[in-house]
Image (tube, grey):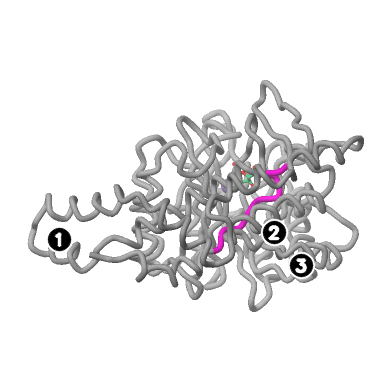
Amino acid sequence: MTTFASITSLLAEQAIELPSWAFGNSGTRFKVFSTPGTPRTPEEKIADAAQVNKHTGLAPTVALHIPWDKVDNYAALGAFANDHGVALGTINSNTFQDDDYKFGSLTHSDPVIRQKAIDHHYECIDIMDATGSRDLKIWLADGTNYPGQQNLRARQDRLADSLAHIYARIGDIQRLVLEYKFFEPAFYHTDVPDWGTSYAQVTALGERAMVCLDTGHHAPGTNIEFIVMQLLRLGKLGSFDFNSRFYADDDLIVGAADPFQLFRILHEVIRGGGYGEGSPVAFMLDQCHNVEDKIPGQIRSVLNVQEMTARALLVDTAALDAAQNTGDVLGANGILMDAFYTDVRPVLAAWRETRGLPGDPMAAYAASGYQARIATDRVGGVQAGWGA
Ligand code: PSV
Ligand code: MN
């Protein structure tokens, strides 16, 4: 039996990157609700993200989305983040909100528009140089709605060519991570629909190009942990965008819809060497808080990841190997379920306190008065929202 004491040093290594856009307003195509205290600037988003780290010790970096988080001076923004106890992380490009990209960006048939999309990525790499960010994350909305609308193969070839230009600009200690999504906003086909396509494209680029797995980007019923295992096995799992879904790309709090799936994913991550400080796998959240308060929504999210990581670390792997190798079907399943059903919340709370953190970060944040303070202080200006 694995004990909690034996996993705390690994738990202490956990770092989960927060998305700046989680702190802005978001919604559906039907309505975006505003929330008192919503940040108006990238600095205010970073200040809010720092609250999550302050109460949990789990979220030392913040990902930016360009142009949503455009500022004049990125080095100054990085210094601002440092002053708040966090650092800037992944830079996300955005080629999905400009009229020129109606029929595609990196895959577009018009070389002028394709170059514009490539240039946007060059700009993102310049920002990475200024912020010290390691990862450029690319998600493309490129795709089509109708059979016959476009030449699928030509688009794939143009994508490979565009990515090669971007990759050539990536610095020695930087990486390109390519995210896949099986549909939306395009409904007939997307140009990077699945892990296999992302894998094929990044493998052609080189070793500093990896796959990003967004847990919300799969068809219902997909065995995501199998994909995790395979990408780790191939050495190409670069990062996660964690969130949870009931139906499509719901972007809900990770672990809320299906905690068991999160546990299974983390079990494969740990087994495959994807966990811990030396691992190439970056844990990130990609979520939107449409009706709940955003800062506690992010605190809940990182705690969910921590709780399922602890349970996955508690799996008795020696016993599991033995059961698996002797064909003990129910024994093996039982060993996994024993870990999954272990309530780690009390021991995690006590352990947090030994590290100078609040045992109950949700309660500590609620008691801090920060939410009321930002609601009072942040009056006027334009609240950040999805796309702003
Ligand atoms: C696309 O659905 C996505 O998952 C990509 O990661 C984007 O950058 C992010 O959402 C923005 O909402
Ligand atoms: Mn994502």
Judge depth for marks 3 and 2 and give the one in front. 3
Q: Is residue 20 magenta?
A: yes
Q: Answer with the quarter of the image where residue 60 lies.
A: bottom right
Q: Position of residue 162 (x, y in %)?
A: 66, 58
Which residue corresponds to the image point at 53% horizontal and 43% vertical from the top-left? Answer: 152
Name which residue type carries label 2. Answer: Ile
**Res 109 visible:** no
Circle 1 residues within 10 Å: few <14, some 14–19, many ≥20: some
Q: Position of residue 351 (x, y in %)?
A: 47, 63
Q: Which residue appears farthest toward the top when viewing the image?
A: 30
Query: Mark 1 = which residue?
Result: 324
Name which residue type carries label 3. Answer: Asn
- Label 2 within 8 A of ligand 1 by Cβ: no
Classify residue 55 as left or right of residue 131: left
C-alpha distance separating marks 2 and 1:
41 Å
Query: Mark 3 = which residue?
Result: 82
Query: Mark 2 = which residue?
Result: 91
Which residue corresponds to the image point at 64% horizontal and 72% vertical from the top-left? Answer: 174
